[in-house]
Image (cartoon, rainbow, N blue to C red):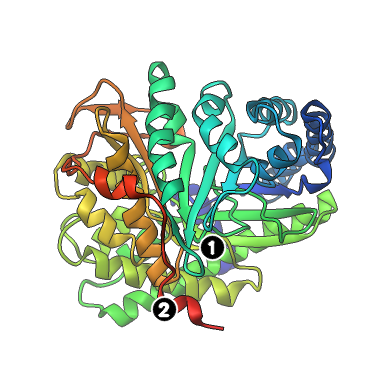
Amino acid sequence: MNDIMETITMIQEENLDIRTITMGISLLDCCDSDIDRSCQKVYDKIYRCAKDLVKTGEDIEKKYGIPIVNKRISVTPIAMLAGASGGDPVKYAKTLDKVAKEVGVNFIGGYSALVQKGFSPGDKALIESIPRALAETDFVCSSVNVGSTKTGINMDAVKLMGKAVKEAAELTKDRQCIGAAKLVVFCNAPEDNPFMAGAFHGPGEPDCVINVGVSGPGVVRSALSKMPDDADLTEVADKIKKTAFKITRVGQLVGTEASHRLGVPFGIIDLSLAPTPAVGDSVAHILEEIGLEQCGAHGTTAALAMLNDAVKKGGVMASSNVGGLSGAFIPVSEDAGMIQAARDNTLSIEKLEAMTAVCSVGLDMIIIPGETEPEVISAVIADEAAIGMVNSKTTAVRVIPAVGLAEGEELDFGGLLGNGPVMKLNTKSPAKMINRGGRIPAPLQSLKK
């Protein structure tokens, strides 16, 4: 009875929710030499697999009283289909957008390319089409993997992505530059990530699968707030671990139920503390509960490392299906504590970069000056990719050049994407390095067999 009441309190008072159930769908059998036929096959398969996804999520919400915030779809990287069909890849984006609206999901991810070691047919065409695809659709999200520990970093792709981010923002400047907010550049991208904008259905995944993304920073913060101030950090880590275990069990329940109802395999639970702009749902506030005056102060990286590790340990004990990114997200515009720390100049991009070495993902939802040069954006991507490559972890960049806004001004997306100040970037030019192109070789760690 105590466990039941504790879970009810987590949901009602501490913002516990299932952030997303994401159906991964393979489109490999939709390849065709004719792009129009291929698009029709894509539409038909996604509709057939996902037509009951939203209703199933809503039914599970009603049955258990657990909020499921988003219902989403991820698909095979579209560059693979574009390589077979040729033609304008934006046709695929519009097909994805149309079927997403038909089945009622929040987002559809997979307008993606995997180019960590070079370009295959379709990759460059897709990358060059990303800004237009994101500007001409509403629900489509895009990601590109430019590096990995095994292959090094494709700097030609990094250069292209700096231009793509800038152009995506410019083409959607009348909509708060939302195009750039739906575009992620990865190193070591996982194939089973349910979180947007980086979700895609990897080529090694089943034909159709259900992945669950759990969230609960408010629950962790609440648990820590009840601890005495003199509790040592070993006790703090243990409390986080036990709380993460309980959160993951809720995700396991939802994933198992959704898998059974939809008749598709249960893939993974991504146990990521994914914040929202809502009061009490902030990763930054967890770090402050641990003992920092404000997120960004010295000690932030150490506290985040402990948090990330404890969350993973608790999740692994609660489920055999933990995967995706799993850890703690630090998206600036989506986290009330991060937003305030950025406004107060306590949190800088340099500090965020250090934090990304010890947590999930990377520089996420950071608003930068609209006049930022593409080469500077490419260099930011290269820095993050290097952290991921050398540390054998996933890193990513999702920055939004706020066209027409300068440092200190605010950009407001509304909803889950939140708002935040335009943060300062070092504008000394890395253009010579970026324009060299080529590939940064894989590190010594890549030789592990």
Horizontal and vertical percent for residue 113?
58, 46
Mark 1: few/some/many CA within 10 Å (<14, 14-19, 20+): many
Closest to the observer, 400 or 239: 400
Closest to the observer, 114 or 16: 114
- Name the residue: 30% across, 71% down: 227
Horizontal and vertical percent for residue 275?
41, 49
Question: Considering only order in the chain, which callout, 2 or 1, is on the residue closer to the N terminus?
Answer: 1
Provide the residue designation for mark 1: 247
Q: Which mark is residue 444?
A: 2
- Name the residue: 28% across, 47% down: 338
**Which amino acid type is shown beneath numbered disc 1?**
Ile
Quadrant of the image occupied by residue 445: bottom left
Residue 314 vertical position relative to residue 25 in the rendered view, above or below: below
Q: Quadrant of the C terminus?
A: bottom right
Q: Quick one: SS at disc 1? A: helix
Q: Quick one: SS at disc 2? A: helix
Residue 211 vertical position relative to residue 315 in the rendered view, above or below: above
Q: Is residue 295 visible?
A: no
Horizontal and vertical percent for residue 401?
32, 32
Horizontal and vertical percent for residue 273?
45, 57
Quadrant of the image occupied by residue 47: top right
Q: Is residue 177 visible?
A: yes
**Which amino acid type is shown beneath numbered disc 2?**
Leu
Quadrant of the image occupied by residue 416: top left
C-beta proximity under 8 Å, tags 1 and 2: no
242 displayed left or right of 362: right
- Name the residue: 35% across, 53% down: 382
